[in-house]
Amino acid sequence: MDINIASLIVSALALLGSGFAVFIQSKQTNKALAQDQNFARANTVIHFTNAFFDLSRQSGQALEENFKDSTWREQYWGLLSAEFYFFHHNVIPPEMFALWMSDLADAYRRYDRLWESHEAYLNQYGSLYSEMKDFFVAIHDASLEKDIYEAVKQKTINWLKGNVVNEVA
């Protein structure tokens, strides 16, 4: 065999080996990025869950009593707005957010003044973030349906499909 042909074969094999190594490295990088994203999503859920429980423990009262306190009420709606932002940007998993929204819809149903309070907050800030207002109006509408939990789940997941922002600004 000619030495040039042998060099060409060795070079081709080395090139194929390098290409395969790049392919494997790319797959491992993508897997690591996906794991990092899942870890970030889990940490975000834990953060907001803790913030909610901290706010709830702060007063030690029932939900409807807390809303009589304007400071507590503003903190609650502010927390919910921040949660929505991360849901809208696909950081909080839609299934988890649907669980939280089911609780909110149930509270809308049980406490008449809760929606009034939230609607006033949304009207105040809605022009700055119209998607947030549209979403919570849909959740309020779901609170009026017979199967509240299924309605909220469907509205939450379907809303996100048409409105997700894939980057956190």
Image (cartoon, rainbow, N blue to C red):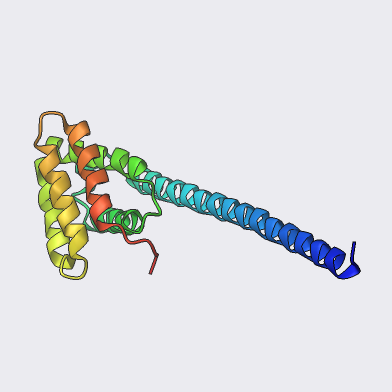
Q: Is residue 12 left or right of residue 92?
A: right
Q: Choose top left, top right, bottom left or bottom right for residue 23.
A: bottom right
Q: Choose top left, top right, bottom left or bottom right for residue 57.
A: top left
- Image coordinates of residue 25 in percent, x first then y, are 67, 57
Q: Is residue 32 left or right of residue 48?
A: right
Q: Is residue 112 visible?
A: yes
| Quadrant containing the C terminus in the rendered view | bottom left
Q: Choose top left, top right, bottom left or bottom right for residue 139.
A: top left
Q: Is residue 78 above or below residue 114?
A: below
Identify the residue at image location x=71%, y=57%: 21
| Furthest-top residue in this view | 147
- Image coordinates of residue 164 in percent, x first then y, are 30, 57
166 or 100, nearer to the observer: 166
Q: Is residue 59 above or below residue 30?
A: above
Identify the residue at image location x=30%, y=55%: 84
137 or 166, nearer to the observer: 166
Q: Is residue 8 left or right of residue 50?
A: right
Q: Is residue 60 visible?
A: no
Q: Is residue 41 left or right of residue 122?
A: right
120 or 102, nearer to the observer: 102
| Quadrant containing the N terminus in the rendered view | bottom right
Identify the residue at image location x=22%, y=53%: 69
- Image coordinates of residue 167 in percent, x first then y, are 39, 64
**Figure label count:** 0
